[in-house]
Image (cartoon, rainbow, N blue to C red):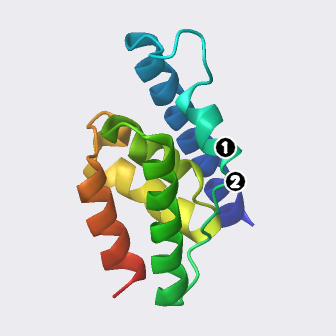
C-alpha cells in the first residue's frame, strides 16, 4: 500500500513539474499565431494516445510513431516534444520517466532533448 501511495505522489510531482516546465516555456516565447491555441491545446486536439508501459514492443513503437506523427502535423518545436510526449505517459511508463528525471536529469532541472528521450524510451520499451 505504501508503494502505491509513493507511486501516486511521484506521478503527481512529475505532472506538476511538467506542467510548470511547459508554462515556463510558453511564457518565454510569445505565441507565433497572435493569440491562437497553445502548443498543448493543439497537441490535445489531435487526441494523442497514452502509453502505460505495456511490455509489447510493437505497442511501444506504435505509440512513438503516432506521437511523432502528431508533432509533424502541429509543427511542434523540438523544445516542446519531450514535455508533450511524457504528458501522455501513464502507470508503469510514467513511473519509469519520473525515476529517470530524478536520477539522471536532476528532477527535471536538466532539459532532455527529444532524440535522447526517444533513445531512452526505445531502450526501455522496444528492446
Where residue 61 appears, as percent x and y from the top left, is 45, 78
Residue 42, picture quadrant: top right
User: Which class describes the residues within 10 Å of circle 1: few (<14), some (14-19), or many (20+)?
Assistant: some
> Where does the N terminus fall, quadrant-wise?
bottom right
What residue lies at 65% left-to-right and 63% top-to-bottom? 49
What residue lies at 43% left-to-right and 10% top-to-bottom? 30
Observer-nearest residue: 53 or 31?
31
- Asked if disc 2 and disc 1 are in contact, CB closer than 8 Å, the reply is yes
Where residue 98 appears, as percent x and y from the top left, is 47, 53
Where residue 36 appears, as percent x and y from the top left, is 60, 18
Residue 78, numbered circle: none
Residue 32, picture quadrant: top left
Observer-nearest residue: 27 or 67?
67
Q: Is residue 113 above or below residue 57?
A: above
What residue lies at 30% left-to-right and 77% top-to-bottom? 123
Numbered disc 2: secondary structure: loop
What residue lies at 36% left-to-right and 39% top-to-bottom? 108
Q: Is residue 69 above or below residue 35?
A: below
Q: Is residue 122 above or below residue 87?
A: below
Where residue 28 appears, as percent x and y from the top left, is 38, 12
7 left or right, relative to 86 = right
> Where does the C terminus fall, quadrant-wise?
bottom left
User: Which class describes the residues within 10 Å of circle 2: few (<14), some (14-19), or many (20+)?
Assistant: few
Residue that carries the numbered disc 2 in the rendered image: 47
92 left or right, relative to 61 = right
Residue that carries the numbered disc 1 in the rendered image: 44
115 left or right, relative to 22 = left
Amino acid at each position: 500500500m505504501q508503494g502505491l501511495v509513493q507511486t501516486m505522489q511521484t506521478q503527481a510531482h512529475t505532472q506538476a513539474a511538467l506542467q510548470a516546465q511547459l508554462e515556463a516555456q510558453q511564457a518565454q516565447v510569445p505565441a507565433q499565431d497572435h493569440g491562437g491555441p497553445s502548443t498543448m491545446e493543439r497537441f490535445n486536439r489531435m487526441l494523442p494516445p497514452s502509453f502505460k508501459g505495456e511490455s509489447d514492443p510493437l505497442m511501444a513503437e506504435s505509440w512513438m510513431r503516432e506521437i511523432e506523427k502528431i508533432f509533424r502535423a502541429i509543427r511542434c518545436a523540438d523544445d516542446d516534444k519531450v514535455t508533450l510526449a511524457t504528458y501522455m505517459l501513464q502507470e508503469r511508463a510514467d513511473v519509469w520517466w519520473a525515476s529517470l528525471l530524478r536520477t539522471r536529469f536532476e528532477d527535471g532541472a536538466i532539459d532532455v532533448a527529444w532524440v535522447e528521450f526517444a533513445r531512452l524510451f526505445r531502450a526501455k520499451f522496444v528492446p
